[in-house]
Image (cartoon, grey):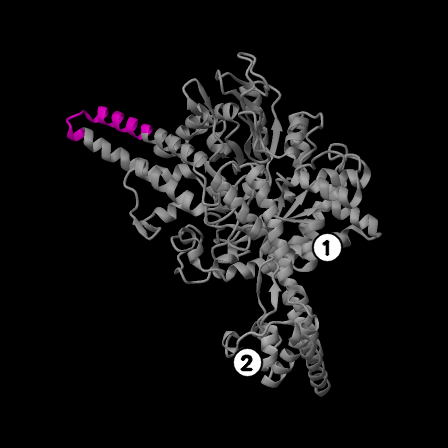
Amino acid sequence: MNNFKENVASEQQQNETTFLKSVAVTKPETLGSSKTTNYIDFETKIAVNNIQIIKKDGTKEVYDIQKVVNAIKKSAARMLVEFTDEEINCICNYVNSSVLKTKQTEIEIFKMHCIVENALENLNPKVAKSYRNYRDYKIDFVNMLDKVYQESQKIMYIGDKENSNADSALVSTKRSLIFNELNKELYKKFFLTVPELQASRDGYIYIHDMSARRDTMNCCLFDVANVLKGGFEMGNLWYNEPKTLEVAFDVIGDIVMAAASQQYGGFTVPEVDKILAPYAEKTFNKNFQKYIDLGVTQEKAEAEALKDVEKDLHDGFQGWEYKFNTVASSRGDYPFITMTMGLGTDKFAKMASMMMLTVRKEGQGKKENKKPVLFPKVVFLYDEELHGKDGELEDLFDAGIECSKKAMYPDWLSLTGDGYVASMYKQYKRVISPMGCRAFLSPWFEKGGMTPADANDKPIFVGRFNIGAISLHLPMIYAKAQKDGKDFYETLDYYMEMIRNLHKRTYEYLGEMRASINPLAFCEGGFYGGNLKHTEKIKPLLKSATASFGITALNELQELHNGKSLVEDGNFALEVMEYINKKVNQFKEEDGHLYAIYGTPAENLCGLQVHQFRKKFGVKEKVSDRGYVSNSFHCHVSEKIGPIEKQDLEGRFWNLLNGGKIQYVKYPVSYNTKAIETLVKRAMVKGFYEGVNMSLAYCDDCGHQELSMDICPKCGSSNLTKIDRMNGYLSYSRVKGDTRLNIAKMEEIKDRVSM
């Protein structure tokens, strides 16, 4: 310390003598604040007052030693150090001396930082490191913002096709996408460890929705019926429970749009037919009494009242289709809304299901140019006793098939076949509706939590949610193990542990959020246990939330292992999935969290993972030589196999991905009712969640429609709208000549034979 002071005094004397002559003397009254005079003598102050600091943005400001004092005090405080006045004076003298020694009237800011660091290094190396880290952090922040700016320019002038639900031509969507870029960078900077960031950048893991996962939760089964019951508050206004069907449709639409905006991922309204039935009955009773009061016969009054209900159902479902496909959420996208239906057996529930299918089959648009909409995704809940031959709802099944062959929706979920979802329904009569396109919740029991407390304990699914998915890029992990000369499962364990730790931190982080982040969910009963006060933390509700381990490119993993596809072999892929299941079950028991295994629906990811693999391991035949990787556990789309063979091949993996899965086949026939019915029923016996896959094409000029056309044969127009299955959901592969899909996904669609 004494040597440092002596050196400072000597240097300062030499520098001041030579430099004072070269600068104009400034009057004392213009020499800044009185605070600064404590740290430098009067003559030095005159000298340095004429020096300007050139900031990073090129602007200039007068040199002010007080800013140095503020900075070093903050750096010291971060290390729990407090400098004495003598030490601060010593540092200031050193800094001033060094500034004068430069003999410059303008000094760049980075030189000033170096001078301050040197001063601190001599006095307290720990504080010097703190100062340096903060400076590096600011440099990182500048670089991060520069990257965000570059991405924002692309979004503004080129657009973005990462999410097919977002129309990046819209101003609101552009704003949201730009904010997402910033939020994504903040997540990387402040939430990820260096190894996690490296694994994500290299492509061994993929952290889904980085732009949102620090703020809120992922997909859910929203309990709309519970919110409606008895009334609720939304946007500081009290909503009374609807008394008519017409009002119920309006209010439910508002609830869905408001709540879906406060999360990311799919938003499912389970068993919507049963939710609407009581309001349909209220409308019927009200109108029936109205007609009776008018002197109409009871038989006529009943018939007219039923017509009124039918009309309200038609108009209500049509209104939803308008709203959900044209009004973007506050996130800038069209919320991924799914509704399940088909189990309601009373008169009004069945009427609701029938009308929902009718409206979807009719489509929306000009009178002679109607086409089906994308949202809500409709899922038919199939119970063999109800919907099979001579079942009470057999005619509803027939209506569903007619709708699927015209609109591809509904998708079909078996509740009475084999497997996890069906077993829960058969044992408990509880439905596990899919969240969004394919995610399923693990069981959570009313009394016992992760396991039933007794024989009477029942699982809860409605009102629960997922906190996010992180996917393993299996071919990348396999290739790394080969390159490093390590066992594949040892390398796989490393990345599974990494995902596990990320999930654990996410549970902890989100648990500190307040219920006010999503009042309809956490305060008004939309989520299970969601009757918290606005200021209460949501941690108790996270006990029943799932977190997903996703897998991608299982077909390419098999190819990398022995040069064979899932169609040709698949045994190694099965072995890997069995291992992952065993490991995740171990994590569940040890951590007490509901982890789930998810067949990742790679949208933009299908192309990104190819680029990541090539960068590390080059181009390998049937692994990275195409522009995309295969989706989850599906056979490669180019395989020349029939729909029955595809169902059987993919069925091998069905019970190994209970956290998220869908099976679909391509129908190489033109609206063949019997073929669709046969394959759907076969899938229902196998316990599948089945998608009907065709390529629907519509001419926007003359209204002609047929499967998979690129030019209208009737009028010659190429102004077409085409609807294809993205993954587990439908999307526009062409809109007025353009597409919302990325290049990799379009290449995959072009190669499809069996999908």
Residues rendered magenta in the picture = 292-311
Q: Residue 323 appears at what percent x and percent y?
A: 41, 35
Q: Is residue 439 above or below residue 124?
A: above
Residue at x 35% of width, y 30% of height: 315
- Is 43 magenta? The answer is no
The residue under label 2 is 37
Return the residue nearer the eye: 425 or 327: 327
Which badge, 1 or 2, comes first in the chain's sequence? 2
Residue at x 67% of width, y 77% of height: 97
The residue under label 1 is 493
Q: Residue 36 appears at what percent x and percent y?
A: 54, 78
Residue at x 70% of width, y 32% of height: 636
Callout 2 environment at 10 Å: few (<14), some (14 to 19), or many (20+)? Answer: some
**Left or right: 720 in relation to 108:** left
Secondary structure beneath label 2: helix
Callout 1 environment at 10 Å: few (<14), some (14 to 19), or many (20+)? Answer: some
Q: Residue 221 appears at what percent x and percent y?
A: 47, 46
